[in-house]
Amino acid sequence: MDLLSLENPVFEVYVTAAALAVLKLMLQGWMTVYRMLRANSGWASPEDLRPGLINRAPDKAQLEVNEYVDRSRRMHRNDLENIPGFLIAGLLFVVVNPNLLLAQVLMYGFLLARLAHFGAYASQLSHEVRATFYTIGSLIVIYMAAHVLWSVLT
Amino acid sequence: MDLLSLENPVFEVYVTAAALAVLKLMLQGWMTVYRMLRANSGWASPEDLRPGLINRAPDKAQLEVNEYVDRSRRMHRNDLENIPGFLIAGLLFVVVNPNLLLAQVLMYGFLLARLAHFGAYASQLSHEVRATFYTIGSLIVIYMAAHVLWSVLT
Amino acid sequence: MDLLSLENPVFEVYVTAAALAVLKLMLQGWMTVYRMLRANSGWASPEDLRPGLINRAPDKAQLEVNEYVDRSRRMHRNDLENIPGFLIAGLLFVVVNPNLLLAQVLMYGFLLARLAHFGAYASQLSHEVRATFYTIGSLIVIYMAAHVLWSVLT
């Protein structure tokens, strides 16, 4: 059987989880846009102070760091530090033909951990809670990459 | 037919678009290098103030944020928020065997939108213009991921 | 032969190099965590100042930029600017069926260059040394993407 085809149930799990992870990553950009528009602040570039449809009453303070907007940018950066690594580690994991249940637990587990991390970060839960969900997601990616290495090198 | 082979015209479109997108991403790093050298400023680390080939006359002000250099860094960050997502969403899109014309429109459309975003950002066009091209690129990636999910889950 | 299977020695090189690159990327996040805990500073969010297991004696200064912690964040950002591009360019490179030795030199060369970049950045070697290793890694990714384009378009 061709491992990288939808006839392989493990690959189907990967494709599903990867598409959801890409959606999470891209939608975080739109959360930042929403917060910039709602706060009418947290703009990134000097030209954003030109009057226009987006910014009708420019003010220099709009270029300062705005915590409400910056929180979404930090969440986005945390996604960038975790999701691309997951997307590639997951693909490599499929190639070493793992157990289906293990793939489901790891891949859907990663998605759940990142969803919980999103919730904890957005609602400003304590550092311990956020760190726990980050840890679960990160360890899953590390495990998958190590499993791949082990399978290829032995 | 094996979908992930160059005999599949949709995969050939993906490989072409993905190679161009990787080049765009990597060259943005070199734009930052060029601007740092030209402005002789915007350095990132304290050790960059040691005299050497790159920096012959160090000055503490070289570590401050330099708008000319930082603009390229912001453009790079915007690439990082969009291009890796495109690269994976595009690969997943090939796997669900889409229409060739649709793949061409979406993938080359993404590249054109990012090229226009680059031009708008580099030449400091208004926020509205830059936001329009960001939106087109982002919606293409979101569409591809949603299309993949729909194909796999139905 | 199916190029994207472990029967293809070039793909095996890619899978090995890619798994190692993912591990490097993910472990950089843990270096930041280690440095935050060790310096007990460089926290990112206001809620990190709530007393808890991670932070027993909160102080507003813990939210300021801490060079020891920020160095690891800059290293992480540099990884994000290079490793995802490598992971995709390497996969595309396999697809155009390159010479095995060339693939080994480029892929393991990229890993060595990034390892040397890590060492130079962590130990605060001069900008020239760090820039040299960045250049090697970046040029390898650019070469692979250009080689892919050339193969597909001719």
Image: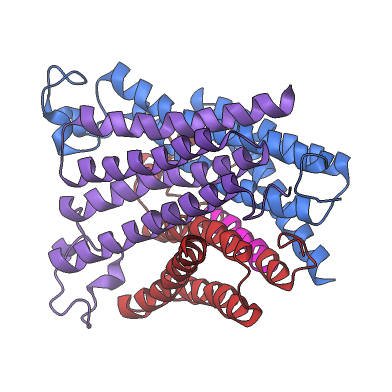
Chain colours: A purple, B red, C blue
The quarter of the image holding the C terminus of chain A is top right
Which quadrant of the figure has residue B91?
A: bottom right
Indicate whether C13 appears above or below B122: above
- Relative image position of residue B150 (x, y in whole percent): 46, 66
- The tally of labels here is 0
Left or right, C119 with respect to B63, comes to right
Does residue B32 belong to the magenta stretch? yes
- Relative image position of residue A68 (x, y in whole percent): 16, 53
Left or right, B135 with respect to A125, comes to right
Is the magenta region chiefly helix, strand or loop? helix
- Residue at 61% across / 58% down in the picture? B22
- Residue B31 appears anywhere in the view: no
Nearer-the-camera pick, C30 or A104: A104
- Residue at 48% across / 40% down in the picture? A104
- Residue at 71% across / 57% down in the picture? C145
- Residue at 51% across / 64% down in the picture? B148
Nearer-the-camera pick, A80 or A40: A80
- Relative image position of residue C17 (x, y in whole percent): 68, 35
Nearer-the-camera pick, C131 or C110: C110
Which quadrant of the figure has residue A69?
A: bottom left
Indicate whether B25 appears above or below C14: below
- Relative image position of residue B110 (x, y in whole percent): 53, 73
Which segment did they paint magenta?
Answer: B16-33
Does residue B9 belong to the magenta stretch? no
